Structures are given as C-alpha cells and as structure tokens.
Amino acid sequence: MRETLVLNAGFEPLSTVSLRRAVVLVMQDKAVVEQAHPGLRIRAATVEVPVPQVIRLCRYVRVPFRQRASWSRRGVLVRDRNRCAYCGRRATTVDHVVPRSRGGGDTWLNTVASCTEDNQRKADRTPEQAGMRLLTQPFEPTPADALLLALGLKDRNAAPPGLLGLSA
Ligand SMILES: [Zn+2]
C-alpha cells in the first residue's frame, strides 16, 4: 500500500494518507505535490499527475484530532459532521448507542451525533429496542480521517472519478 506524507501549509508533517486520497487532494487543488516518485505517473480521468510521495496543503488546517483522539462530545459531533446518525438532520446532541445505564461507555464506537428529537425518542434503549436504525456506523477517527474532516472532504472513502492506475 502506497502512503503519501501530508504536510501542513507550514511544512509540518500531519499524517499519511493513501495514494488515492493524496491524488484527490491534489486534483481538488487542496494540496500541491512537494515530492513525487521519479518516472511514475498516475492517470486520473483525463489528466496525468506525478505519483506523490509528499504533498503539502495549500491552506493551513487545524486538525481536530491528535494521533489517538481522546473521546469528547465535541469530537463526536465533528466526526459525524453534525448530522444525526438516525435521521440525517442537524445534530446537536450525542447519543450513546448502548445507553450508559446499560453499561455503554463514552467511547468513539458507542456514541453518535443525534438530533434532540431522536435522542429523546430513543431514550434509555438500544437502537433495536427503539426500532431505530443507524444510518452510519460510528468509527474511531484516525489522523487521516481527522485530516479529511478538517479539509471538508465529504466521503472518507472517496476516490476520484476515473482514477485508472499507475503508469511508468
Ligand atoms: Zn435525528
């Protein structure tokens, strides 16, 4: 798996991301290639770009999570982009998937952003008991996720359309 080092606009190393993500950032003009694999190009849609080893962000970003993000309510809302995990509307609260009264903890994998209505409707029950379905599964944000969140990329698994592959 090829990994690309991402530098902040001020040249401090932030994280590594997959080659695909690095190419997305360059194609969206969010980053420039600082160092590329000599002689290797990647074809994406109608253009060919160098295969980036190191990219640098065009704009300084404040990354909301550190190497291992400690859990916080605010962090959950940032991770879930303030979208309710049950209905997709604007979330202002954090819901415990397994309620605290049933032993559910303050952890990344047990908490989701929720609107007030759904939080109250679910109350002290699991989603199954409440007959509610999670639209997205909670995850522990990695430094790469944090970076993509900070850059405002929509889909953490997004790949550029028409990314065809490497050519020498
Ligand atoms: Zn909701």
Image (spheres, rainbow, N blue to C red):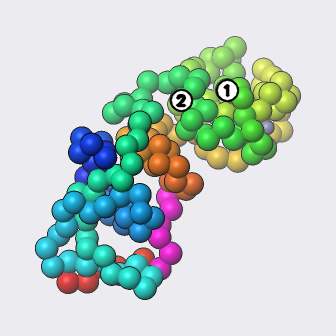
Mark 2: which secondary structure?
helix
Q: Which residue is mark 1?
A: 94
Q: Is residue 108 above or below residue 72?
A: below
Q: Is residue 143 above or below residue 158?
A: above
Name the mark nearer the viewer: 2 or 1.
Answer: 2
Q: Which residue is mark 2?
A: 75
Q: Quadrant of residue 117?
A: top right
Q: Which residues are magenta?
A: 157-162
Q: Is residue 165 above or below residue 119?
A: below
Q: Where in the figure is residue 40, as x and y percent of width and height?
A: 20, 77
Q: Quadrant of residue 110?
A: top right
Q: Where in the figure is residue 112, as x and y percent of width and height?
A: 64, 33
* Residue at horizontal 50 percent and vertical 45 percent from the top: 149
Lower position in the chain sequence, tag 2 or tag 1: 2
Residue 161 covered by magenta stretch: yes
* Residue at horizontal 47 percent and vertical 48 percent from the top: 151
Asked whether residue 75 appears in the rendered view, the answer is: yes
